[in-house]
Amino acid sequence: MRSSSGRGLRPNVLGTFDTVVMAVAGSAPAYSIAATTAVLVATVGLAGPAALLYCAIPMLGIVLAFGRLGRIDVNAGAGYSWVGRTLHPFLGFLSGWALVVSTTIFMVAGSLPAGAMTLGLFDPELADNPALATTVGAGWFLAMLLVVLGGARMTVRAQLLLTGVESVILLFFIGAALLHEGAAAAFDWSWFGFSHFDGPAGFASGALIATFYYWGWDVTSNLSEEIRDSRRVSGLGALVGVGVVFLLFEAFTVAVNVILTAGEIQAAGSNVLAVLGAAIWPGVGGKLLVIAVLLSTVATLETTLIQVTRSLFAMGRDRTMPAALGLVHRRWNTPWAAICVVGVVALAMFVASTALGSVRDVVTAAVAAIGLQIALYYGLAGIAAVVAYRRMLLTSVRDFLLSGAWPLLGALFMLWIFFESLGELSGASVAIGIGGLAAGLVPMIHYWRRGSTYYRPARLDATCAVEPDGGGGDPHRAHYADKALATDF
């Protein structure tokens, strides 16, 4: 093992198609639909398609913000670096910490359903055993941990298989749902309007859950140091990936409204796609969609591991967390220390989760808590983009829209749903969401007092950015050139 100083992660490993695949896998279409549809219906009723639609518009603003920021600062820490260099290092650290906490919580929220679904394929009664589901889910988690340890190329190869099969199954059932008897008559355009929301608070709660649907595409930014021509490709891959999953989310949410009743959805819980599949194709359809959800869950566990370990790697490199987290494996060029730490912490949380109740209770509380943290770090990144490009906003309509107005809309929307939803969430969800963020104050203050250079940053400014030669070579060379040309706080 060696220090991550210099190049660290292996550059130029992933191409454009690989990046799109990672963005789709990060959002986990089948898993997001299965894990969250019952929660969304319980919150907004038939307005699920509207919540996904109106959340997608500002979400695209955040996608644009990540893409624009990635053009001037190639960093595995993504928002952790960008927010720290534009707004304030404390906000930057909290942005990175929010990602670390949300992804770590997701290790439980994602692994438990994976275990339950695996058991359910053999014996449905076993799926209701939290201890057994936790054990099998932990096995899936460890398998993905080993894949991530093997490097970005191995990770993408696994994703091509998992996400490819998942997408084929989902597209097949979208077509089958369109042809299902009575589907056309049951469809209602009002599902895309505001009439089904219970006021602004109800809309905010639905939007918070919809944010969880889309979350994960930003794995492309955490992989930026390993992507060819990453200043262009990282943002492009995220944009295409979000477009793909938006269409899948809308199609399946409409299909659920058309084919199942609200009572059936609530009774199904996280098995809603299995019930939908059985209704469309009795006997076989349910199991096929369960397989799709299982593949999606495993795939998104992998991308989530990428996000949290690359973020911790960047923090270790900057000495805002233990320096050991910045160590890179000699052979695989992966942050092995960060991967091991995440593995230990997640396994401890698996054990603790068995005391929290059923799989459904754990997932429901975790989804809402993660939504708060996502809304916070997405909102801060949107503001960071506007600040970084502030001197260029009036140079053209394109810059004003893509670097200013749309990212700002996304940021304000994310921060609004963060504060608006606090009064609507359960005590457990608020405790997990806010308590997890507050825990970040301890390492932040400790390493700030120890004099980490992260807390004495150079301001990120698009007008001072240095483009790398052809997009190749060492991404950190351009990154530090940016710092040398920028103005200190």
Image: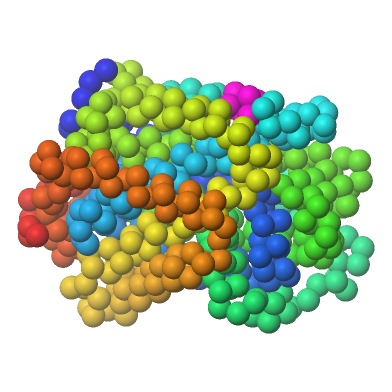
**Residue 351 visible at all:** yes
Q: Is residue 139 magenta?
A: yes
Residue 273 image point, x, y percent:
76, 49
Quadrant in the rendering for residue 67: bottom left
Q: What's the residue at 79%, 50% (across, down)?
A: 268
Q: What's the residue at 18%, 30% (across, down)?
A: 5
Left/right of residue 408 with respect to residue 154 in the rendered view: left
Residue 325 image point, x, y percent:
29, 29
Q: What's the residue at 48%, 48% (across, down)?
A: 432
The rendered magenta stretch, by its main secondary structure, is classed as helix
> In the displayed structure, would residue 43 be above or below residue 275?
below
Foreground pick, 186 / 133 = 133
Left/right of residue 166 with respect to residue 323 in the rendered view: right
Q: Quadrant of the C terminus?
A: bottom left
Residue 296 image point, x, y percent:
63, 41
> In the displayed structure, would residue 417 be above or below residue 265?
below
Q: What's the residue at 74%, 78% (across, down)?
A: 189
Q: How is the image coloured?
A: rainbow
Q: Is residue 153 magenta?
A: no
Residue 294 image point, x, y percent:
68, 37
Foreground pick, 261 / 223 = 261
Q: Quadrant of the N terminus?
A: top left
**What stretch of residues is rendered in magenta?**
134-141
Foreground pick, 100 / 475 = 100
**Residue 241 visible at all:** no
Left/right of residue 420 with respect to residue 448 in the rendered view: right
> In the displayed structure, would residue 135 be above or below residue 488?
above
